[in-house]
Image (tube, rainbow, N blue to C red):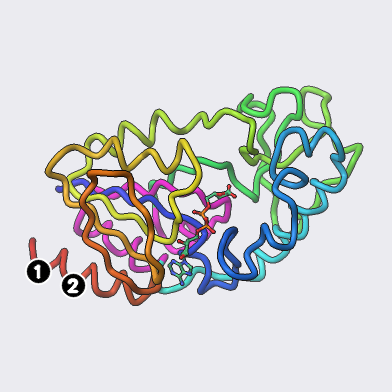
Amino acid sequence: MKKIVFLTGAGISVESGFSTFRGANGLWEEYKVEDVASIEGYWRNPSLVINFYNKLRKQLVESSPNEGHRLVASLEEHFDTTVVTQNVDDLHERAGSSNVIHLHGELMKVTSSSNPNDPRCIQTLTPERLDIHIGDKAKDGSQLRPFIVWFGEAVPMMEEAAKAAMQADIFVVIGTSLNVYPAAGLISYVPQGTKIYLIDPNPVRVPYGIDVHTIQKGASEGMKELKEILLAQK
Ligand code: APR
């Protein structure tokens, strides 16, 4: 089976009711990145950050995957599929994708604030227990924090994502402005000659010298068009 690798961003979850970060009325127009999405912001005001993600988690359990997520998952019947996502939502998984790499963490998980990547301290929250509070402790006795990769922190899954990109026969970028590194750099790991598709309703600047086939549509419409192209080529 040919290997297809997706790199997705906030745009694929727009049709599920989530705003993007940098688009019109994006999340970063409402909140300052350094307050709610940086390690310094967390240590400056942990309860503000904990409550910010409690709110997002509530929105997540009330939302559902859209046609774009479902079409990505449907390609698993035809391709060895890896989804690398910058999104912290679990909408790819809930749409049926079985191989998802989260570069920026997972909203439904919480962890140790002294050793966030210690697997013994990572816990998955449930709709019955969605919130964490100051005073809730991880297994190592430290304050529980969101299992999110904040600006200023390492991106532990980048190596695994790069390995997948290096083996891709087809690479598909959906719903990301390619502004944030190292995630955006993934496109540079794709071998010469691998076909790259980019689905986005707006123009996206790609690194110099990288040739992409652009489908200037939203995620669902774009994935419908891409699926037809890919299945016609099989
Ligand atoms: N379908 C597909 N793409 C869309 C749609 C849609 N319906 N609506 C908007 N988009 C596109 C926008 O045109 C933009 O190119 O989604 C992209 C969203 O870009 P950003 O808001 O920058 O989000 P993203 O690239 O995922 O941000 C990367 O930045 O703040 C950090 O950690 C955060 O993971 C995030 C990272």
Classify 216 as above or below 85: below
Residue 215 placement (x, y as % from top left):
28, 69
The answer to whether residue 165 is magenta is: no
Q: Is residue 173 left or right of residue 91?
A: left
Identify the element where label 1 is drawn: helix
Classify 210 as above or below 21: above
The reply to whether the residue tagged 1 has its Cβ within 8 angstroms of ligand 1 is no
> Residue 232 shows which numbered tag?
1
Quadrant containing the C terminus in the rendered view: bottom left
User: Start and end of the magenta stretch?
Assistant: 69-97
The answer to whether residue 90 is magenta is: yes
Question: Which residue occupies 26% across, 61% down?
Answer: 75
> Residue 228 shows which numbered tag?
2
- Displayed quadrant of residue 101: top left
Nearest the camera: 71 or 96? 71
Nearest the camera: 126 or 161? 161
Q: CA distance from mark 2 to mark 1?
A: 6 Å
> Residue 38 shows which numbered tag?
none
Q: Is residue 14 left or right of residue 68?
A: right
Identify the element where label 2 is drawn: helix
Question: Dot 2: within a 10 Å radius of its alpha carbon, few (fewer than 14), some, or many (20 or more) residues?
Answer: few
- Displayed quadrant of residue 217: bottom left
Q: Is residue 84 left or right of residue 107?
A: left
Residue 7 placement (x, y as % from top left):
38, 50
Q: Is residue 37 left or right of residue 21?
A: right
- Whether label 2 touches label 1, CB < 8 Å: yes
Amino acid found under the numbered disc labelled 1: Ala
